Image (cartoon, rainbow, N blue to C red):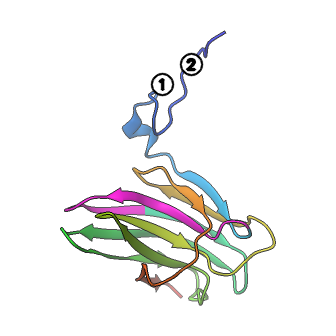
């Protein structure tokens, strides 16, 4: 028996339009097996966008946050960063933002570099891209972007 009500995903239409579906935050947990979330994928040339996110990292100093990543691409570069509103600036080493260029396309990653005991770092991300958990090893191919903490 087929589906009674079609379920909307990033690739399939459902009751909601794909543009409405993309406004529902995606919940993603990382920490132990996965240390990064790809929040924007295959960004071509001349794109300007922001992606909002909020969540909680209980490792180390603890970080409850609400913020957004912003970026723009040209024909050869990606520039951007993030602004986060947090109760206090206790973010040292808990959250980082990186871009990576591959085959003329850019990818954007939120990274929690401190390994946790389980997948306990919780992110809610509102993005027009399907967000994916990944295990990445940071090397020279990644470009670190600035994160500014607001609050205190």
Q: Residues within 10 Å of mark 2 (few under 14, many from 20)?
A: few
Residue 98 image label: none
Residue occupying the far front of the picture: 103
Where residue 93 sits: x, y (%)? 60, 87
The quarter of the picture where the C terminus appears is bottom right
Where residue 56 sits: x, y (%)? 65, 70
Give the extent of the magenta segment: 33-51
Whether residue 61 is situated above or below residue 34 in the rendered picture: below
Helix, strand or loop under label 2: loop
Residue occupying the far right of the picture: 117
Residue identified by numbered label 1:
15
Report if residue 102 is visible in the image: yes
Where residue 44 sits: x, y (%)? 27, 58
Helix, strand or loop under label 1: loop
Work out whether residue 119 or residue 124 is closer to the camera in this orientation and state it.
119
Asked if marks 2 and 1 touch (Cβ < 8 Å), the reply is: yes
Report if residue 66 is visible in the image: no
Whether residue 3 is situated above or below residue 99 in the rendered picture: above
Q: Place residue 86 in its image quadrant.
A: bottom right
- 30 sits left or right of 17 in the view: right
The secondary structure that dominates the magenta segment is strand
Residue 5 image label: 2
The quarter of the picture where the N terminus appears is top right
Whether residue 114 is situated above or below residue 127 in the rendered picture: below
Q: Any magenta on residue 39?
A: yes
Q: Place residue 116 in its image quadrant.
A: bottom right
Whether residue 149 is situated above or below residue 117 in the rendered picture: below
Q: Image point 41% across, 76% down: which residue?
A: 82
Q: Any magenta on residue 130?
A: no
């Amino acid at each position: 028996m087929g589906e009674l009500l079609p379920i909307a995903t990033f690739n399939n239409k459902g009751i909601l339009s794909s543009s409405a579906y993309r406004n529902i935050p995606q919940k993603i947990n990382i920490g132990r097996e996965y240390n990064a979330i790809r929040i924007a994928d295959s960004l071509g040339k001349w794109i300007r966008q922001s992606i909002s996110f909020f969540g909680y990292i209980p490792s180390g100093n603890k970080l409850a946050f609400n913020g957004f990543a912003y970026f723009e691409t040209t024909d050869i570069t990606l520039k951007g960063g993030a602004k986060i509103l947090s109760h206090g600036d206790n973010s040292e080493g808990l959250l980082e933002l990186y871009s990576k260029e591959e085959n003329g396309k850019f990818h954007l990653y939120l990274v929690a570099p401190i390994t946790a005991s389980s997948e306990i770092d919780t992110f809610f991300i509102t993005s027009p891209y399907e967000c994916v958990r990944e295990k990445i090893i940071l090397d020279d191919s990644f470009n670190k972007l600035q994160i500014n903490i607001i609050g205190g």
